[in-house]
Amino acid sequence: MEQQQLRDIVALFATEGSIAEIKPLGEGLINDTFLVRTAETTAPDYVLQRINHHVFPDVEMVMHNIAAVTGHIRHKLEAQGTPDIDRRVLTFIRLKDDAQKLYVQKDGNFWRLMIFISNAITKQAVNPESSRAAGLAFGNFQAMLSDLPVPLGETIPNFHNMEFRLQQLRQVVVEDPVGRVAEPEVQHLLREIEMRAVEMCKAERMGREDILPKRICHCDTKVNNMLFDENDNVLCVIDLDTVMPNFIFSDYGDFLRTAANLVAEDCPDMDRVGFRMDIFRAFTEGYLQSARSFLLPVEVENLPYAVALFPYMQCVRFLWDYLSGDKYWKCQYATHNFVRANNQFHLLKSIESHYDEMTACIKA
């Protein structure tokens, strides 16, 4: 976008200082993000984001959830006497002409503005130390929100609903829109998926039986969704668009799906795919240290299931997209989505081989 257009949007918010420059920030795949530098040293810099309303069609719900979550965390930090709170929780800026609103709609797009947290570091890769810090941070995030009095909406309905994801896959198998279902490797993967389907849907069953509660979860627990300080301590959790009610398995299992794979999720060499127990142990240690204050025994007992659930779910989703004609994820070549699905299935098999070891570790 033109600089003047971006400046006009920033001018709608109740900011301090004057704009020195606006430039792209980060490599996010969902929202367009810009850094707004101010001319005065006494004024903060800002982050301007265009919310992807195709992924998040109910922008009002997204911002309601974010306001409730950041407000509750800020209140908790204040009560604890935490110093430098503005670096520990995101601060969103309200509109000049409507102090109740945290976003603006302009020319068919939705925009929000937040204070830029300076001298913060993001990470793309993990090691045991950063995984332990991530576990501690995400567990603490859930713990602080365990008594949130404001109900939150589901910003992406059925996002981590395994029954729904299997229903999607089965439907596309029936329709076979691009003629890929008969491929032998697809048939093999479909058989393996169906063999595990009943077990992998047990979270939804336990939820219906009121055995398993829904918590407030981040639902996108990657290491790059946290900010670290220069000493590798976690400052705060960011990218809150997917914060919504879900089973705690979402935050625990999804982090390990990406962080504990020996290779990237689209690595075509299946012999290299494997599950890192050192990352599992470190993340679990941090997570249980901060989350055990509110977790039920049934949630802790099923953490190994959560580790297996998310590569299984992602295998189903990648295969669904492959059979649909590659409409959801961007692909670099014709079988990219199938490679991704196969990669996640091999990760699942590696996790299954470590199941007893994971269970013993959690009990210990």
Image (cartoon, rainbow, N blue to C red):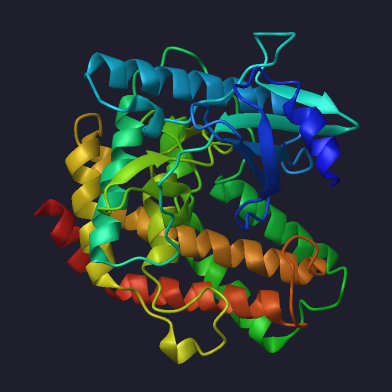
Q: Is residue 233 above or below residue 207?
A: below
Residue 9 figure quarter: top right
Farthest residue, direction left: 364
Which residue is at a point 27% across and 48% down the rendered structure image?
Answer: 233
Residue 261 figure quarter: bottom left
Q: Position of residue 45 (x, y in %)?
A: 56, 35
- The answer to whether 300 appears left or right of 213 in the picture is left
Residue 118 figure quarter: top left
Report if residue 152 is visible in the image.
no
Which residue is at a point 41% across and 38% down the rendered structure image?
Answer: 206
| Frontmost residue, 278 versus 134 | 134
Q: Position of residue 354 (x, y in %)?
A: 26, 72
Farthest residue, direction right: 107
Which residue is at a point 68% across and 33% down the rendered structure image?
Answer: 19
| Frontmost residue, 206 versus 241 | 241
Q: Is residue 129 above or below residue 161?
A: below
- The answer to whether 341 appears left or right of 276 in the picture is right
Q: Position of residue 46 (x, y in %)?
A: 59, 35
Report if residue 276 is visible in the image.
yes
| Frontmost residue, 172 versus 114 | 114
Q: Is residue 81 above or below residue 133?
A: above
- The answer to whether 330 appears left or right of 200 in the picture is right
Quadrant in which the C terminus appears: bottom left
| Frontmost residue, 352 versus 11 | 11
Which residue is at a point 56% across and 30% down the rendered structure image?
Answer: 40
Q: Position of residue 291 (x, y in %)?
A: 25, 37
